[in-house]
């Protein structure tokens, strides 16, 4: 609404002021949400940050952080967390990429129907899905019964209450988070590029690896990032399917509070988890336009 | 692109499957693989349904004898019923709080195009990016100080900040594909901004708002970690009780509850899918 080319208008300043004020009023519409997030998230997390620097004497101390560096068990927890998150992400990529590719090649009606296979688990409670895997994978569960009846193996396999069970559950829960952004980035690839490639003599595999695959990478990175970051904070699935053998950071935080009432140690772990998550998200946002994926772009 | 092939399957296998002259036959492995993955995504969860109708103490498939005893146990238990009501109440209140707040924020941030809009947006979606355990123990610690532990209000407020990001993301994307000039037109004809929004904009983005509301409900209804810390006593949620039951034993009552929860999620997904494509 700039009126640079018009002669000086006495109302111009007034209009500009009015527009500026309206912008603030509109921004103010987000104030209630903002206040809520400040009070319920920022304030408590800030408090935890403070608690993490309070030692057992009740004074300022770095002992909660020092313990993490010294204690072997804490080291193991961080290694487990990263290992489980990396493995889950890698398996999700291996399974999710072909699925997303398949969906992206379908005509829209068939794609909508097949998409339900991705959306239904996405909408189903995480706890229910974890429970279903517990039932299927346990010693006398469906999979062991069938495997033994079919003569595939003779002793019940240890499929749950260990790393295997945790990974199966987490991959099942995280797969939609990879497939959905990957699918939308694949759908955005202009099919004319592939036509052009094959016109120029590329074999199907060539046009896939040299044209389609590179163009799908931003979606793949974004999806993998979401999966990895969400995995870092996982709690329910390792608790139920890990059977106490897979202790991730969130599980240890809970143990520190429920079993040992040690808020300092729990807070310090929480702060480390938060910082790692935020650093990964920050670095990633510099490398790729994340807000397009999360829907924040204007 | 040809999907529906000829009458003979052999013909279909030789047809080009995409713009790169690859045939369906050469791609058969992809179709088989995708079918297996989709099967593994959907079926393991659904196997809980027949198991919940089994008469046996032990979870078996297929059940040798059918019965409704686990549903009777569930509906007959005061503890489970109370927990269900708590979850339903928390879900409903979270929806009623998160949907308007999130829609308001999405509208304000989008329309104002303020230099801070992007920053505020990112800030408001952080609750789904940071580990939930932090929000859970943070809220727990603060609620202990102000004596709000085990209160429905405390649970709802914490669930609302988890649902806000979803509302914001869904509704913002609706605004981006909406022509704001329509609202301008209404205002130039004398409507106030509120009237213009209610009469012109809201009806056109209503499907996104409804989807956002359904997601808010499920966010609260299915949430475990925050509920584990800040709900309890008379206000224990269904998921909290389920989680605690899971750690101790495999009680077939959980299969019955899971079946009901699957039915609720599928129903809501169906509503969202049907509403999401109004003009087809």
Image (cartoon, rainbow, N blue to C red):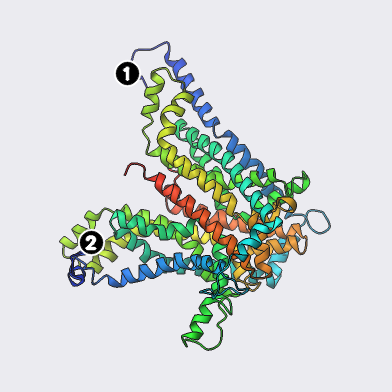
Q: Nearer the viewer, residue B179 or A293?
A: B179
Q: Secondary structure at mark 1?
A: loop
User: Where in the figure is residue A101, as x and y percent of width and height?
Assistant: 33, 62
Instruction: Single out the mark in the foreground, 2 or 1.
Output: 2
User: Which label was assigned to residue A5?
Assistant: 1
Quadrant where the image shows the C terminus of chain B: top left
- Residue extending farthest right: A57
What residue sits 50% from the left and 42% below the top?
A: B168
Is B186 positioned to the left or the right of A236 in the image? left
Q: Secondary structure at mark 2?
A: loop
Quadrant in which the N terminus of chain B is drawn: bottom left
Residue at 56%, 50% in the rendered image: B219
CB under 8 Å between discs 2 and 1:
no
Q: How many marks?
A: 2
Q: Looking at the image, can residue A125 be seen?
A: no
Q: Spot the residue most to the top.
A: A10
- Residues at marks 2 and 1, CA–CA distance in whole angstroms: 60 Å
User: Which chain letter goes with mark 2?
Assistant: B
Q: Which mark is residue B4?
A: 2
Q: Is residue A4 above or below residue A202?
A: above
Q: In the image, is residue B113 above or below residue B226?
A: above
| Residue at position x 37%, y 28% in the image | B182
Residue at x-position 63% and y-position 45%: B89
Relative horizontal placement of residue B263, taking residue B148 as reference (left or right):
left
Closest to the observer: A217 or B34?
Answer: B34
């Amino acid at each position: 609404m700039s009126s640079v080319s018009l002669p000086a208008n006495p109302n111009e300043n007034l209009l500009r002021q009015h527009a500026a004020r309206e912008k603030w009023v509109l921004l103010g519409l987000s104030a209630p949400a903002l206040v809520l997030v400040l009070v319920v998230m920022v304030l408590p997390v800030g408090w935890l940050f403070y608690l993490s620097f309070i030692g057992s004497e009740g004074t300022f101390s770095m002992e909660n952080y020092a313990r993490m560096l010294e204690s072997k068990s804490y080291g193991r927890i961080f290694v487990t967390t990263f290992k489980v998150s990396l493995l889950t992400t890698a398996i999700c990529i291996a399974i999710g990429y072909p699925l997303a590719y398949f969906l992206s090649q379908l005509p829209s009606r068939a794609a909508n129907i097949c998409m339900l296979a991705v959306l239904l688990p996405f909408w189903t409670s995480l706890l229910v899905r974890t429970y279903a895997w517990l039932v299927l994978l346990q010693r006398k569960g469906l999979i062991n019964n069938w495997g033994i009846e079919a003569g595939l193996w003779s002793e019940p396999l240890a499929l749950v209450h260990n790393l295997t069970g945790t990974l199966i559950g987490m991959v099942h829960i995280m797969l939609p988070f990879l497939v959905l952004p990957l699918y939308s980035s694949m759908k955005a690839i202009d099919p004319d590029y592939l036509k052009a490639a094959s016109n120029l003599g590329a074999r199907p595999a060539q046009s896939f690896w040299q044209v389609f695959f590179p163009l799908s990478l931003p979606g793949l990175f974004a999806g993998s990032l979401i999966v990895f970051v969400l995995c870092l904070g996982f709690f329910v699935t390792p608790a139920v399917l890990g059977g106490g053998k897979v202790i991730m950071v969130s599980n240890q935080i809970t143990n520190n509070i429920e079993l040992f009432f040690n808020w300092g140690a729990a807070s310090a772990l929480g702060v480390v988890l938060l910082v790692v998550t935020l650093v990964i998200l920050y670095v990633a946002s510099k490398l790729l336009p994340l807000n397009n994926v999360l829907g924040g772009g204007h | 692109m040809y999907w529906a092939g000829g009458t003979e399957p052999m013909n279909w296998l030789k047809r080009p499957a995409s713009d790169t002259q690859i045939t369906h036959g050469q791609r058969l492995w992809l179709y088989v693989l995708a079918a297996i993955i989709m099967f593994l995504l959907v079926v393991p969860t659904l196997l809980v349904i027949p198991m919940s109708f089994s008469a046996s103490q032990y979870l078996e498939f297929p059940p040798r004898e059918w019965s409704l005893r686990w549903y009777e146990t569930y509906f007959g238990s005061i503890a489970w019923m109370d927990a269900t009501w708590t979850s339903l109440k928390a879900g409903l209140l979270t929806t009623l709080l998160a949907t308007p707040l999130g829609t308001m924020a999405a509208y304000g941030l989008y329309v104002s195009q303020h230099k801070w809009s992007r920053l505020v947006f990112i800030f408001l979606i952080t609750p789904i990016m940071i580990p939930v355990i932090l929000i859970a123990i943070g809220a727990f610690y603060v609620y202990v100080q102000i004596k709000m532990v085990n209160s429905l209000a405390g649970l709802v407020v914490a669930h609302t900040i988890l649902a806000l990001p979803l509302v914001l993301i869904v509704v913002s994307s609706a605004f981006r594909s909406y022509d704001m000039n329509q609202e301008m037109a209404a205002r130039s004809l004398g409507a106030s901004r509120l009237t213009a929004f209610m009469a012109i904009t809201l009806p056109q983005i209503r499907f996104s708002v409804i989807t956002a509301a359904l997601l808010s409900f499920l966010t609260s209804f299915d949430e475990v970690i925050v509920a584990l810390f800040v709900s309890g006593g008379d206000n224990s949620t269904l998921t909290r009780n389920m989680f605690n039951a899971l750690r101790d034993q495999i009680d077939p009552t959980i299969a019955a509850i899971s079946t009901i929860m699957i039915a609720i999620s599928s129903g809501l997904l169906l509503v969202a899918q049907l509403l999401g494509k109004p003009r087809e």
